Image: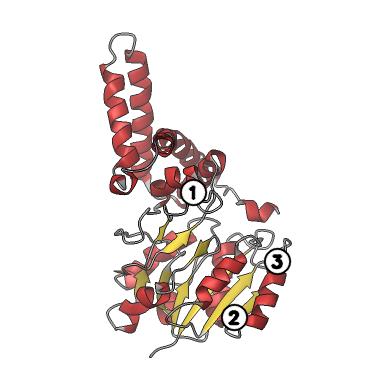
Amino acid sequence: MTAVSVVSTVLNEADDIDLLVESLMRQTLAPAEVVIVDGGSSDGTWERLEAARLKYPALVPIRDESCNLKRSAGPIARGRNVAIAVASSDVVACADAGCTYPPDWLANLTAPILNGDAEYSLGGAYIDLSETDPSHATVWDVASAPFFGVKLNPGAATKSCTARSMAFRKELWRRAGGFPETVFYGEDTQFDAKARQLARPAFAERAKACYRPRHSFVSAARQMASYSAAWGILGGRWARLWRNLARCLAEILAAIALAYSPIPLACVLALEIYFAFRLDWNDLRKAPLRMLGARLVFSAMVPWVAAWSQSAGSIGKKFRPNRQNFT
């Protein structure tokens, strides 16, 4: 059987790095190696990786301080590229800090490639609703999930191109030019667009990363703003911008019309309920009212934050760094 390497890039992920490594080392399809590039962590992440290397011979930690925002415009992409370049296998799977991986993840994700059916495979990500501990899944994790392409069911169909769960032949990565090191956010989306020009992706079943963002309302809104600004900078997803602007305008007009009739506002509310629950209502039907309310609130906020941030990004051309780069 063809060997598979797993790669990841991290920066200041001390709270999550042990769970990531342990889950990758417990795969039913044992990776030939797990290459993790640390971009210069200052919170103990690197020390944890060094300690884990003594326990797991297949772990290959690399400290490369060019893979942070101080030295690279695209530190996440650069970290991935450094790890993939080092990987010895022809098939490479990407994983991410902030996630854990079920034991059959690697086998399921790479099956289309190892079977000869594809050169490129996507798995997606999900939030585990069975976790009741707020340190695992918060109300705002669930509320924001569909707006970041995250599912609430590990078996749900997905076409997400997230690098939290992505595999490809190394030759395809070379032909696509690697992950673009000129962008801070959206490097996986950019890579995906190039890879799809060269090979049709397979959407692997039950190959999702278990994502644990631990969002508050503020952190989820900030992530939405950062991603939207990236879309503006990269010059893509204009249909989404116009849709969000239309929703904002509809809400304004409905509020003005309230002086004459409540019907426009009722129509807008019905539309917002549709947008809030259309992608995963079956998984939320038994959720508590507090969670449903949080989803509706976040959904109503999305067009305002997304439209403003995408417009600002297209004008200012400035990415918003994540928390790890300020530690």
Between 187 and 4, which is closer to the camera in this rendering? Answer: 4
What percent of the width, then of the height, locates residue 237?
A: 38, 48
The residue indicated by pointer 2 is 59
Where does label 1 land, which residue? 227
Q: Is residue 231 visible?
A: yes
Task: Count neighbours of disc 3 (C-alpha within 10 A) and say few if under 14, some if 14 to 19, many if 20 or more.
Answer: some
Residue at the bottom extreme? 1
Q: Quadrant of the N terminus?
A: bottom left
- In the structure shown, which secondary structural element does the residue marked by tag 2 occupy? strand
For residue 260, which quarter of the picture? top left
Task: Give x and y (percent) for residue 217.
Answer: 53, 39
Q: Amino acid at mark 3?
A: Gly
N-terminal of the two: label 3 or label 2? 3
Q: Which residue is mark 3?
A: 40
User: Is 140 above or below relative to 250?
Assistant: below
Give the CA distance from mark 1 to mark 3. Answer: 24 Å
